[in-house]
Amino acid sequence: MSYSSWFQAHGEKHKKIIEKLMHLSDDELIEYFRFDNMVQNEPDFCPLYAKNKKCHDNEELNCYFCACPNFRFKDDGFKQQEERTLFSICGINSKDGSQYISDDAIHQNCAGCFVPHSEAYIKKHFSRDWFEAMSKVNKY
Ligand code: SF4
């Protein structure tokens, strides 16, 4: 699956959950997306839920802004860096981000970054429309 396909499919899943929960306030909606609740009530939202496994080992993990409004990707790659294609970058150059570098590709590695998963960040950048919140991710 390309990143674009995953991005579209994930946004559609997010949208369905929001439509189901129209009666909740913004704060209640954000609370609903806490990892522990999502594992129980939305098992299909993330493949890691089946193993009760977190992408980031943090008690406050909130999945509302998975993937991340600051992530930038291009399925065809942004540019060549010698023999490698640069496929993704961090739009805010987070100090906690890094890169996966293989023989022919470079991908943004967000494993050490918690920016989009804190509720303070989600509240600051909140939108019920996930595609709107992620509007810069694949447009540049
Ligand atoms: S490094 Fe952090 S802020 Fe940057 S794209 Fe990844 S999760 Fe988002």
Image (cartoon, rainbow, N blue to C red):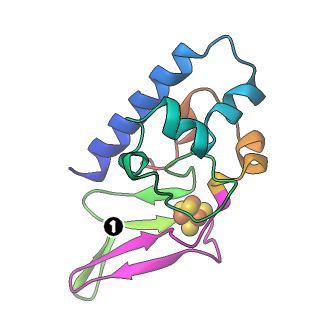
For this rendering, which residue is in front, 98 or 117? 117
- Residue range in magenta is 92-115
User: What residue lies at 27% left-to-right and 83% top-to-bottom?
Assistant: 102
- The amino acid type found where label 1 is placed reads Phe
Q: Can residue 131 be spotted in the picture?
A: no
Q: Can residue 120 be spotted in the picture?
A: yes
Query: Is 72 situated above or below 99?
Result: above
x and y, in percent, of residue 79 in the image: 32, 72
Residue placed furthest toward the top: 23
User: What residue lies at 67% left-to-right and 10% top-to-bottom?
Assistant: 23
Query: Is 37 situated above or below 18?
Result: below
* Callout 1: SS: loop
**Residue 131 located within the stretch drawn in magenta:** no
User: What residue lies at 34% left-to-right and 57% top-to-bottom?
Assistant: 74
x and y, in percent, of residue 32 in the image: 64, 31
Residue 17 shown left or right of residue 119 in the figure: left
Residue 44 picture quarter: top left
Q: Which residue is mark 1?
A: 87
**Residue 105 located within the stretch drawn in magenta:** yes
Neighbours of disc 1 within 10 Å: few (<14), some (14-19), many (20+): some
Residue 85 picture quarter: bottom left
For this rendering, which residue is in front, 128 or 28? 28
Residue behind label 1 places its C-beta within 8 angstroms of ligand 1? no
Which quarter holds ligand 1?
A: bottom right
x and y, in percent, of residue 55 in the image: 49, 60
User: What residue lies at 76% left-to-right and 40% top-to-bottom?
Assistant: 123
